[in-house]
Image (cartoon, helix red, strand yellow):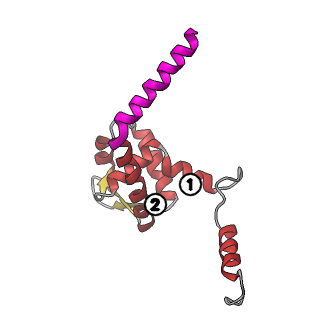
Amino acid sequence: MDIDTPGASLRAALTRQNQGAQLMAAACPSRAVLSHLTSRWAVLVQVLLLSGTRRFSELRREVGGVSEKMLAQTLDALVSDGFVLRQAYLVIPPKVEYSLTPLGREAAERLAVLVDWIEDNYPRIEQAREDVKAAGDVARAA
């Protein structure tokens, strides 16, 4: 394609876009990645791993409320998608460590911004919840 042709860069951009994932399409397999990446436990695990490598037991302790089963499933999904590296050491007792891959670090940095925003704005969110509940109570009473 001749780059000097009017509209050539736009056509190239549209071609690249059409080769990528289409999350809005019902059958797009990238939706599974979105689900893995943005689940409650996955977000928390990734944000923790931003500060360094962790063992399973450390993650279990630091992520309040997660069960061993859910943590294991979450880590398996993140490892399968290439966001987390699982490093097993052949020692007794067995030692397994988890860390972010470069791809995982990119994703986790973006998720950390969202986590920070939620923490910073939680009072406003809670107020909005109360306002919606109060409005619903008034409507039901009328």
Rendering coords of residue 2 (x, y %): 71, 90
Rendering coords of residue 29 (x, y %): 65, 56
| Left or right, 61 with reference to 140 | left
Front-most of residues 78 and 21: 21
Q: Residue drawn at (71%, 52%), measured in percent from left and top? A: 27
| Region rendered in magenta | 119-142
Instruction: Give the residue at the far front of this rendering.
Output: 142
Name the amino acid, label 2: Phe
On residue 33, the disc is 1
Q: Is residue 123 above or below residue 48?
A: above
Which image quarter holds the N terminus? bottom right
Kindly state the secondary structure of the residue where label 2 is placed. loop
Q: Is residue 3 above or below residue 42?
A: below
Q: How far apart in space, not on screen, are marks 1 and 2 (Cα)?
A: 10 Å
Q: Which residue is mark 2?
A: 83
Front-most of residues 140 and 68: 140
Residue density around tag 1, few if under 14, some if 14–19, many if 20 or more, within 10 Å: some
Kindly state the secondary structure of the residue where label 1 is placed. helix
Name the amino acid, label 1: Val
Residue 21 visible in this rendered orientation of the protein: yes
Q: Is residue 6 above or below residue 34?
A: below
* Majority SS type along the magenta span: helix
